[in-house]
C-alpha cells in the first residue's frame, strides 16, 4: 500500500515534532515516523534525564555540606538509587508522553511507528507501508560511539543510554572519556557515593576548551575525590571475576584500574547507517553524518537533514534551530543559515561551564588582536553568599571592532549568566553596550560589566 503526503519526517527528536506542527498548520499533510521513543536523545537518554539525575546528586552534595551553612543533619546522608531512578523516569516519561500525544492528536499529521528506510529519493517504507512525498526531513539523531578497545568484547559496559536503567550504586565506576558526557556522570555518581575514575587519552580534560578551563574543571572534580587519569594512550580491558580491569599507559599512577562498572563516553555516531540513504542518493561524510548545505538541504532536491545526524551541532538547541531554519526558509520566504549560528553550550558539572563563541587559543591562532579579562568567582559576592566560589569568568573581545569574540564562564549560575553575552554577540553590538548596563544586585550577572571594565590587550 502506498500513501502520499506533502511531507515526511523521519524521527521524532527535537526538530521533527515542531516541524510537523508548522507544516500541518500551513495546510500540509504530514507523516512522522519514529522507531523508538518519542522525543529523541534529549527526552530519553540525554538532557532531561541526566539533568534530573544531576539535581538528585546536587541535593545529596548539599546535604553533606549542611554544616557549612550552620545546618545540622543527624547521621550520614543516604542516597536511595531506586528512588533517584524513579524520579528520573517520571520526569523523562512525562516529556516523552507529551511529545507523542501532541503528534497523535495533531490535525493533518499521521504517526507511523517502525523503522523507516528509503526506497528512492521520494519514497520511504515503514514495514509493509510505502510513503511518498516531495519533501522529506531526516531527524534521526545519533548514539554513543563504541570504540574498538582491546578486550572490550570480554567485558560488560555501559553507555549514556544503558546507564539510564541503573537503579543501584556502582562500587567503582570507571569512565572512559573525559569530556562533557563523561564528566557529568563522573561528578553525579561520585556524589551518589561511588568511587569514580575518569580515563582520558588526551593530556587534559575537556581538551577543546582553553587550558585554564580544563585545569579548573579538573580541580573541581579532584576536590570531590574523583580520580583523574589523563594521557591514557593505550587503554585495554580484561575481566577479573565480576570486576573490570582497565589497563592504561599513563605518565602517572598505577598501570591498571580495578572497577566494578565501566562507562564508555567517547563521542557519538549518527543513526544513518540503516536508512537506505544510498537508494535515495543522499551522501554522507566518512563518519556517517549526512552532508548538508547552509540551509540544511542534502545533495538530493527535496530532502533535508536536521539535528545531530547532519554534524552541524550535537545539542538540543541546535536541533531546534535547525527546525527554525528549515521552517523559515520553506514557509516564510526566509533565508536563514546555519553559518549565522554562534557556538553556545554548557558543561553541566557543578558549578557549570557556560561557553559562547571562540576560545582564547582559537583567537590567538587567528592572529587577531584581542582584549581579555578574567575574574575568579571568589570575588563574586553572590558566589560567596552561596558558598560556591569555585571557577572563574573570562571574556574575549576583538581589540579593533570591540565586538565580543567569546566567553568562558565557569561558576555558579554561569549556564544562565552566559546568555547576556550571547545576546550582545547576536546583536553584533560592541562590548561597551553590555558594560554600560545596570544589572540587579546581588547576582552573578552584575559582575559582567565589571569584568568588561578589566579588559586588557593580550598578545
Image (cartoon, helix red, strand yellow):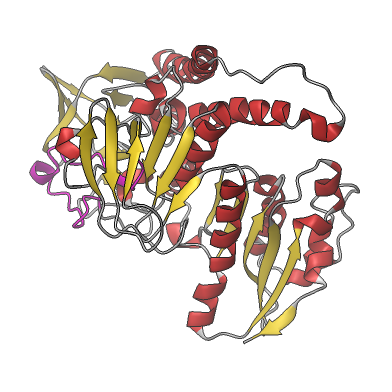
User: Over which residues does the magenta segment extend?
Assistant: 264-290
> For the image shown, how many numbered marks are present on the structure?
0
Residue 428 spot, x, y in % from top left: 66, 67
Residue for point 17% across, 49% down: 282
* Residue 275 in the image, given as x and y percentages of width and height: 16, 36
Horizontal side of residue 105 vs 441, given as left or right: left
**Relative side of 246 to 387, left or right:** left
> Is residue 270 on the magenta stretch?
yes
Q: State the residue in front, 192 or 244.
A: 244
- Residue 274 at least partly seen: no
Above/below status of 188 relative to 255? above
- Residue 374 visible within the image: yes
Image location (x, y in percent) of residue 93: 47, 16
Quadrant location, the N terminus: top left
Examine the image and state in which quarter residue 60 appears: top right
Q: Front-most of 404 and 176?
A: 176
**Residue depicted at 60% across the width and 42% down the height:** 224
- Main secondary structure of the magenta stretch: loop
Say which of 419 and 18 sits in front.
Answer: 419
Residue 371 versus residue 377 in the image, above or below: below
Residue 206, image x, y percentages: 47, 56
The residue at 44%/18% (across/down) is 168
Which quarter of the figure is the C terminus placed in? bottom right
User: In the figure, is residue 426 to the left or right of 365?
Assistant: right
Q: Is residue 2 left or right of residue 450?
A: left
Residue 152 magenta-highlighted: no
Q: Nearer the viewer, residue 374 or 428?
A: 374
Amino acid at each position: 500500500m502506498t500513501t502520499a503526503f506533502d511531507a515526511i519526517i523521519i524521527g521524532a527528536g527535537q526538530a521533527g515534532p515542531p516541524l510537523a506542527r508548522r507544516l500541518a498548520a500551513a495546510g500540509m499533510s504530514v507523516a512522522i515516523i519514529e522507531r523508538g521513543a518519542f522525543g529523541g536523545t534529549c527526552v530519553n537518554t540525554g538532557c532531561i534525564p541526566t539533568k534530573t539525575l544531576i539535581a538528585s546528586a546536587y541535593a545529596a552534595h548539599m546535604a553533606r555540606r549542611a554544616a557549612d551553612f550552620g545546618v545540622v543533619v543527624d547521621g550520614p546522608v543516604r542516597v536511595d538509587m531506586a528512588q533517584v531512578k524513579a524520579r528520573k523516569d517520571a520526569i523523562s516519561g512525562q516529556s516523552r508522553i507529551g511529545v507523542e500525544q501532541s503528534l497523535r492528536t495533531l490535525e493533518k499529521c499521521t504517526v507511523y511507528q517502525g523503522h523507516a528506510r528509503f526506497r528512492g529519493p521520494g519514497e520511504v517504507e515503514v514495514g509493509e507501508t510505502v510513503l511518498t512525498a516531495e519533501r522529506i526531513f531526516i531527524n534521526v539523531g545519533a548514539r554513543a560511539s563504541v570504540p574498538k578497545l582491546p578486550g572490550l568484547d570480554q567485558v560488560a559496559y555501559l553507555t549514556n543510554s544503558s546507564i539510564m536503567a541503573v537503579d543501584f550504586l556502582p562500587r567503582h565506576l570507571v569512565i572512559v572519556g573525559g569530556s562533557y558526557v563523561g564528566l557529568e556522570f563522573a561528578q553525579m555518581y561520585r556524589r551518589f557515593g561511588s568511587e569514580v575514575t575518569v580515563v582520558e587519552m588526551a593530556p587534559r580534560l575537556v581538551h577543546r576548551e582553553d587550558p585554564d578551563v580544563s585545569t579548573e574543571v579538573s580541580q573541581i572534580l579532584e576536590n570531590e575525590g574523583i580520580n583523574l587519569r589523563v594521557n591514557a594512550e593505550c587503554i585495554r580491558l580484561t575481566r577479573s571475576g565480576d570486576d573490570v580491569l582497565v589497563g592504561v599507559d599513563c605518565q602517572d599512577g598505577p598501570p591498571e584500574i580495578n572497577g566494578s562498572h565501566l562507562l564508555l563516553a567517547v563521542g557519538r555516531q549518527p543513526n544513518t547507517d540503516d536508512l537506505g540513504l544510498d537508494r535515495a542518493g543522499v551522501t554522507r561524510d566518512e563518519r556517517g553524518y549526512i552532508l548538508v548545505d547552509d540551509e540544511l538541504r542534502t545533495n538530493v532536491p527535496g530532502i533535508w537533514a536536521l539535528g545531530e545526524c547532519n554534524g552541524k551541532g550535537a545539542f538540543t538547541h541546535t536541533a531546534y534551530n535547525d527546525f527554525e531554519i528549515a521552517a523559515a526558509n520553506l514557509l516564510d520566504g526566509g533565508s536563514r543559515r546555519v553559518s549565522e549560528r554562534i557556538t553556545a553550550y554548557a558543561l553541566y558539572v557543578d558549578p557549570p561551564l557556560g561557553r559562547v563563541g571562540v576560545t582564547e587559543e582559537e583567537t590567538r591562532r587567528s592572529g587577531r588582536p584581542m582584549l581579555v579579562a578574567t575574574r575568579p568567582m571568589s570575588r563574586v559576592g553572590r558566589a560567596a553568599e552561596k558558598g560556591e566560589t569555585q571557577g572563574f569568568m573570562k571574556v574575549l573581545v576583538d581589540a579593533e571592532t570591540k565586538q565580543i569574540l567569546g566567553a568562558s564562564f565557569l561558576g555558579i549560575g554561569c549556564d544562565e549568566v552566559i546568555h547576556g553575552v550571547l545576546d550582545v554577540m547576536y546583536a553584533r553590538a560592541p562590548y561597551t553596550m553590555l558594560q554600560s548596563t545596570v544589572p540587579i544586585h546581588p547576582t552573578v550577572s552584575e559582575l559582567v560589566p565589571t569584568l568588561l571594565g578589566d579588559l586588557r590587550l593580550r598578545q
